[in-house]
Image (tube, rainbow, N blue to C red):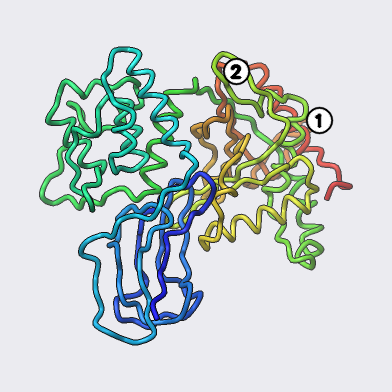
Amino acid sequence: MTTDVIMPQLGESITEGTIVNWFKKVGDWVEKDESLLLIATDKVDAEVPSPASGFLHELCYPENETVPIDTVIARLTQEKGAPRAAETAPAPGPAKAQPEPQEQRVLQAVGASRQAGSDTNVEELRRVRSSPLVRRMAAEHNVNLTNVSGTGISGRVTKKDFVSFLERRPEQVEATTPAARKSLDTGKYAYQPVASDRLEPFSPMRGQIADHMVISRDTSVHVTTVFEVDMTRVARLRSKHMQRYEESGVKLSYLPFILNAVNKGISQYPVINSAVVDRSIAYRKEVNLGMAVAVDWGLLVPVIRNADEKSLLGLARSVGELADRARTRKLSPDELQGGTFTVTNPGVFGSLFGTPIINQPQVAIMCVGTITKRPVVIEDDAIAVRHMMYLALSFDHRVIDGATADRFMKTVKDHLEQFPEELV
């Protein structure tokens, strides 16, 4: 009896996954629901459990290979037989009927380039085996992927193949957007590695982060404002109620207080929670707060949905649960999408403040600095030791004026410094 292991679909918009690591070797015994491999998508990394108990008879794909969903990637048997390693890849499973958003964007870009005079064939672009990243790069550079020779399994066009193609065709290097030009590691300022260097290719997550950061820098007009906040009252409230929260199974950190204050600020200045649509501003009713979580393999931003409807206890519970799932690779792709405003907290590592890059398509992001005790001049010119913190807001100046950003930050500051005890 043979059991197929299928590449799962981790979210509605996910159409493929990259095999990062096989946890078992061919011939090993695997228990049902035991982690069999780690896969990465453009949204999240996830461990795939074994669908049944058995011997790992065949690996259909090697590590670092990108595989469409619903494709057989391994086989299990009840009897230990002659194992087979992945040499050639089987034909991918049937494609989903619905088009993937990434492909839609690429085809739209191709359509625009055709109107400009390009002869790119949309149907040919659909048929070429490649990743969404490669298809997007092809659209940005007006390149017909049928002209690119693929070295991946079954002739798949990889990013390396595409970059090599552009290097051989200098007339194609000129991209349609600044982000596309910067996405290539070429040009007179490119570093040329030497023999003593250790080259490590980008992981799927690192590649996504790199692309998103470049695109965001070229999309939004970044401006940063920094405020100093006296967190002494919050520190006292946290110390006073920490044990009660722990009895409910919730760790009370400073972050829920800050998120509560952000909700207060957004309620008064909703443009902070908006997005840009062409030359219009989309004011979003939902307040979905993203919280950046540093993990060993990169950075994740899980989203607290309808954060403005949650109490401080609810925010604290969401912060703890999402952070734990992020660090144990238990997040679903849906928990990483739909954010309307992001808070990043490098203060836990000792940073005073930072100027973070906006998480598109949002228009602002807040950076939380470390909280330290230091002497401060207070009322009547007295000097006292206070818990002080810097908050920095990076905002898109196309949408948010400096005065609006500062008023929003002043609201957040005032709420934290006068935090109502009845909310704790």
Label 1 Cα crowd, 10 Å radius (few <14 / some 14-19 / many 20+): few
Residue for point 20% across, 53% down? 198
Q: Which mark is residue 204?
A: none
Please tell me in which quadrant of the rendered image residue 35 appears: bottom left
Label 2 Cα crowd, 10 Å radius (few <14 / some 14-19 / many 20+): many
Q: Nearer the viewer, mark 2 or mark 1?
A: 2
Q: How many marks?
A: 2
Pointer 1 residue: 380
Residue for point 41% across, 80% down? 30
Residue type for callout 2: Val
Looking at the image, which is closer to me, 190 or 178? 178
Q: Marks 2/1: CA distance?
A: 40 Å
Q: Is residue 306 left or right of residue 188?
A: right
Residue 50: x, y in percent? 46, 72
Please tell me in which quadrant of the rendered image residue 382 appears: top right
Pointer 2 residue: 399
Residue type for callout 1: Asp
User: Where 339 sits versus 112, above or below?
Assistant: below
Q: Is residue 35 left or right of residue 58?
A: right
Q: Residue furthest right?
A: 422
Residue for point 18% across, 47% down? 151
Q: Is residue 177 left or right of residue 377?
A: left
Looking at the image, which is closer to me, 70 or 264? 70
Residue for point 69% across, 44% down? 305
Contact (CB < 8 A) between labels 2 and 1?
no
Helix, strand or loop at mark 2: loop
Residue 179: x, y in percent? 36, 26
Looking at the image, which is closer to me, 157 or 44? 157
Q: Is residue 28 left or right of residue 303?
A: left
Residue 412: x, y in percent? 72, 33
